Amino acid sequence: MSQKKSLFSDAQSRMADIFDRLDVHCDVRRQLEQPKCIHQAAIPVRMDDGSLRVFPGWRVQYDQSRGPGKGGVRFHPNVDADEVTALSFWMVLKCALVNLPFGGAKGGVQVDPKLLSRMELERLSRGYIRAFYDVIGPDRDIPAPDVNTNEIVMGWMVDEYSEITREKVPAIITGKPPEMGGSAGRTAATGRGALLVLETWARRKGKRPEDTTIAVQGFGNAGYYFALLAHEAGYRIVALSDSKGAIHTNKALDPEPIWRHKNETRELKGMVYCESSVCTESDVGQISQEALLALDVDVLVLAALENAITTDNVGQVRAGAILEIANGPVSREADKTLAKRGIAVLPDVLVNAGGVTVSYFEWVQGRTGEYWDKATVDEKLESRMLPTACACFDRADRDATTVREAAYAIAVERIAKAIESRGDSCYFKQ
Ligand code: GLU
């Protein structure tokens, strides 16, 4: 485990707070205290200049009581076993919350993929599958995209799996290109799901889209689709940031041309990553990324990485509510401060669950061979997200807790049923 503050310990302490209040068997708590399996591999990649580099990679299968493992693979220089474990744990809760027949897993490679050529990236993606081939499978553990991995990377991964098995196995990976068995609507699914949660919340609070200002931290795939769909629904996107900078206006930003411009002006054209930034927009004001987090807006959307809001900067937050599209963007301590200040946090396990929900649809389509059109997928997504969001808000009202506590409670009760149905210690007592 690395020197940085443990994300997994933070996640576990948060969970302990919830368990203390829930009436579930202690066996359930014990089973969810640690991951079932942490697989680690050294992934060798032949670089374009002929040299060899070896990248550390992980696949963590946290719990599979409700079904095969499910979760993305991220490529990032800061990835380590601790981070992947925390992310796999959140996948367990997320899949249970949306009632998908999956457990939770996650993968990662410690690499800065933006420094690799396209060919090197392909070799790394294929290497990941070769390294973890024995522990994944359509009924075992199904990878998907996450930070810095996209449709193209998933395409290489599913292809590598087929090369090894000599069979087409579309249900082994989700988030694939549609031409390789991917689902319609998967790319926009996380952003679309997040908007559905925001709309459900806004309706209950009597907030109209045109009166609701939004700042978005993180303008990658999920942040972009959220911003685009929110803009189309009439919300006012007033600020956007990415890893290079932030922009702000007093009116409203149209995300589509900004995204197009960002992609068109990317410096390294051969790569699959956008190297340009929202700050190349010349007709809007630029602010610092920290200033975006402190804007006086109705909703602050966190769509970048974990720990965007911690005890260091929580005091500066002036937003009315926070929408967590990234996984773990608010630390446990910061969360407590926000709750005391009455700032609602709509939690990651609910808000970003649209991605894994459409992954589930893709898995079903891959297994049956029957493919649905985008309208069908969007409709099915809505019919999962809306009742889930309402259940979380109702439970939070009923128990007078935060929405995160309510979401965790619903998820843990479902996981508990799966664990208990195999027999708990009461059952085995004479
Ligand atoms: N990486 C996404 C998440 O954190 C999607 C996972 C999936 O589709 O399996 O939810």
Image (tube, rainbow, N blue to C red):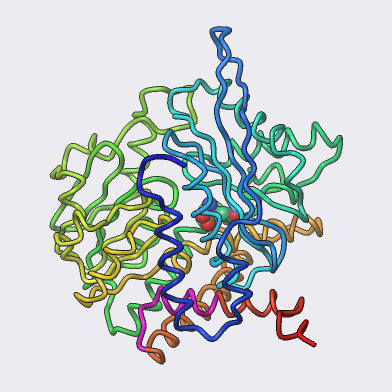
Task: Residue 236: give x, y in percent of width and height.
Answer: 25, 63
| Along the viewing direction, whichever of 130 and 7 lies nearer the viewer | 7
Secondary structure mainly formed by the magenta segment: helix
| Along the viewing direction, whichever of 201 and 262 lies nearer the viewer | 201
Residue drawn 76% across the image and 76% down it: 422
Residue drawn 84% across the image and 37% down it: 165
Residue 178 relative to residue 367: left or right: left
Compared with residue 83, is residue 273 higher up or lower down, i.e. above or below? above
Seen as rendered, the residue at the extreme front is: 430
| Along the viewing direction, whichever of 419 and 250 lies nearer the viewer | 419
Seen as rendered, the residue at the extreme bottom is: 398
Residue drawn 70% across the image and 52% down it: 141
Residue 404 relative to residue 205: left or right: right
Is residue 401 found inside the magenta-colored segment of the image? yes
Task: Residue 108: give x, y in percent of width and height.
Answer: 54, 41
Quadrant for the C terminus in the image: bottom right
Residue 210 relative to residue 172: left or right: left
Compared with residue 73, is residue 65 higher up or lower down, i.e. above or below? below
Task: Residue 295: give x, y in percent of width and height.
Answer: 15, 58
Task: Residue 31: give x, y in percent of width and height.
Answer: 62, 67
Identify the magenta region.
400-411
Ligand 1 shown in quarter: bottom right
Quarter occupied by residue 330: bottom left
Is residue 125 found inside the magenta-colored segment of the image? no
Quarter occupied by residue 252: bottom left
| Along the viewing direction, whichever of 263 and 16 lies nearer the viewer | 16
